[in-house]
Image: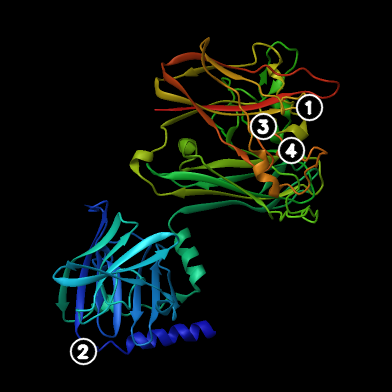
Amino acid sequence: MKYFITFVSILISFSAYAQNTGEVYKVTYQRSSHGKPLTNQSPLILYSSDTETVVASEAIIQGKAELPYERFFVDRANGSYLKQAFFQSGKQIVTSDAALLSKQNFTITDEKKEILGYECTKAVTSVNSNTIELWFTDKAPVKGAPSELGQDLGLVLEMVRNGNSAITAISVEKVKRIPNALRLPDLAEAVDDLSYKDLLWKSRFTNLSIFRNEQINFIAEPKSDSVLRFANGTIILKKVNVPAIQEGNSVFVELIEKSNGDAYDRTGTVFMIPTDRDISFLDGLTKDVSALSVYENGNGKEYRGVIRTEKYTPLVELMRFFTPFGVKQFNHIQLKGKNWQDSVSYRQDITELAPILTNQEVWIGTFIGNYDGGGHIVSLDLSIHPGRPDNSPAQKVVPLFNTLNVMEMAGQDYATMFDVEKGLEVKFTLPSDMKNVQLRFITTGHGGWGGGDEFVPKENAIFLDGAEVFSFTPWRTDCGSYRLYNPASGNFSNGLSSSDLSRSNWCPGTLTPPVFIDMGDLSAGEHVIRVQIPQGEPEGTSFSSWNVSGVLIGE
C-alpha cells in the first residue's frame, strides 16, 4: 500500500505540470556504432522543460513501435525518475526511483567541444565496467539526457559508451509543448524496480514452462496431472504445444536440477519423441520395451529402440546432462572453504532442431537414471527468442540413432554394441537431396571403475557409406571446476575428489554439448552411417557402454 501511495503521488506530481508555461525543447538523437549511423534503429526524442523531461523513441511517438517498449520521465520538482513499459497483452507496468538522479556520480573534465552550436563539456562515469562519456551544455535553458544518466548535468547532447557506441543529438528545437500522449503516464500496475526489469526482460521472448519442480525417482507413485511417468518413475513426459518458430529465432532449453535423496552422478537427458512412423518410443513406454524396433550387430544381443528403421524413428536428444553428487540434499556435508550450490542449471542452444519442434504438439520428456526413492527434482523450460535472419534454423532434420537406454529401469539394455568392429550401423533412405549436411553427434563413455570407458579415453570414428569422415577422442579434463556442485563426492587419499576426475566427455554437474560433423551434400537414396568405438572388455560384473545420439541436419 505504501508503494501504491508513492506512485499515486508521482502521477499527481506530473499532472500538476499539465499546464506548464515554461520553455519546452525537443532534442532528436541518432544512434551510431564505430562512427556509422544505425539507420535501422528509431531515433530517440527528448522533450524537456524546467519542470519535466520525457524520453521515447520516434517510433513510439508515431505509434509504430514494436511491443514491448518503454518510455521514461523525470519530475524535476523532486528529482524522481519513472519508467513505464507497454506489453503486447495490453498490460502496462511502471516503476519509480525518487533517489536515482542523486545517486549518480560523474567526473567533470576540462575537455570541450561544440555540438549543434552549443559548447559542451565532457563528464565521465562508469557503469558495470563500461566507460560512459556524456557531453553536456549548461548554455541551454533546460536540462535532460537521452538516458537516465546525467539528467541533472545540463542538456546532454552526446553519450558515448566505451568509445565506439554513441547517441548524438542531430537537432535541437524549441516547441510549444510536450505532446499530451507523452507527458502523462497512463494508469499502470506499479511494481518495484527488480520486478519491472524482470517482467520487461521476459516479455521479449516466448517461454514454455514444461516441468516445474517435478520429481524423478524410482517407484514413483502415479499422479493425476498433465505429467506422465514411466519406467518406475525415472521418466517424466508431457505433451507441449510449441508455437511457430520464425526464421532467425533462437531456441534454448534449460533444466534446473537438485537432489531429493539420490547422492550419485547420474546420466540424464531431455528428449523429444517423434511420432512420424508406425512405431514410436511411446509404444515402448505404454506397452513394453519389446514393442520397439530391434537392432542386432552380431554380438548376440538385441538392442531395442536405438536406430531409425522404415517403421520407427528414435528419440531426438535435445540435451544430455549429468547430475552432480547430491547437490542441495547433501549440502549438510561440511568441508572447510566449500560453500555448496543449491542446484544446477543446464542451458543449451538447440536452434538447429527448430524444424521438428515448430508449430505443433510434441512429446517432450526428461530421464534421470536412478534407483532412489527420493531421486531428483527438476524444472524444464523451452524458450524462443527473436533473432536475425542469418541465424535461421536448418530446413531438414533426420533422426538416425540414440543408444541412451532411457527405459533403463524398465528393461532397456545398455549400449554395449561397440564390443565388435561393426559397432553401431544405421541404414537410412533420403527421399530427396540434402545439402550442407551435418551430423549432430552427442557421445559419452561409461563404465565406472578404473578400467571402465568412463575413465579411459577412446577414439570415436564416424563412417559414411564405408568411408571415414571424422574421428576424435571425447574427453573432459575440467571436471574439478564443478566441485561446488558435488557435496557428496567421494574424497581420496591423494587429495582428489571423485568429481574432479577426467571422464569420457562428461563431468558430474555438466551438460555434454553436441559435436557438429560436416557430411557434405547427400544425394537422394540409401546411405549407411556407422559409429565405431573400441569399447573396453568387461571385468566381472562391470562393463563399459557408450551413449551416442545423432541426427542429420541440412538444407
* Disc 1 residue crowd, few under 14, some 14–19, many 20+, Cα 10 Å: few
Relative side of 350 to 542, left or right = left
Q: Position of residue 410 (x, y in %)?
A: 77, 33
Kindly identify which numbered label has been placed on residue 283.
3
Query: Label 1, label 2: how many angstroms apart (C-alpha)?
Result: 83 Å
Location of residue 315 with respect to 75 vertically, above or below: above
Q: Quadrant of the C terminus?
A: top left
Relative side of 252 to 149, left or right = right
Q: Which of marks 1 and 3 is nearer the N terminus?
A: 3
Q: Is mark 4 on a helix, strand or loop?
A: loop
Q: Which of marks 2 and 3 is nearer the N terminus?
A: 2
Query: Label 2, label 3: how many angstroms apart (C-alpha)?
Result: 76 Å
Q: In which quarter of the image is the N terminus?
A: bottom right
Q: Nearer the viewer, residue 28 or 196?
A: 28
For the residues bearing labels 4 and 1, Cβ distance under 8 angstroms: no
Q: Earlier in the sequence, mark 4 or mark 1?
A: 4
Q: Which of marks 1 and 2 is nearer the N terminus?
A: 2
Q: Which of 8 and 152 is in front in this view?
A: 152
Query: Label 1, label 3: how many angstroms apart (C-alpha)?
Result: 38 Å
Kindly identify which numbered label has been placed on residue 438.
none
Relative side of 505 to 396, left or right = right
Q: Position of residue 349 (x, y in %)?
A: 50, 42
Q: Mark 2 points at which residue?
A: 21
Q: Mark 4 points at which residue?
A: 369
Amino acid type at mark 4: Gly
Disc 2 or disc 3, which is closer to the eye? 2
Q: Where is residue 44 in the image (x, y as percent from the top left)?
A: 26, 65
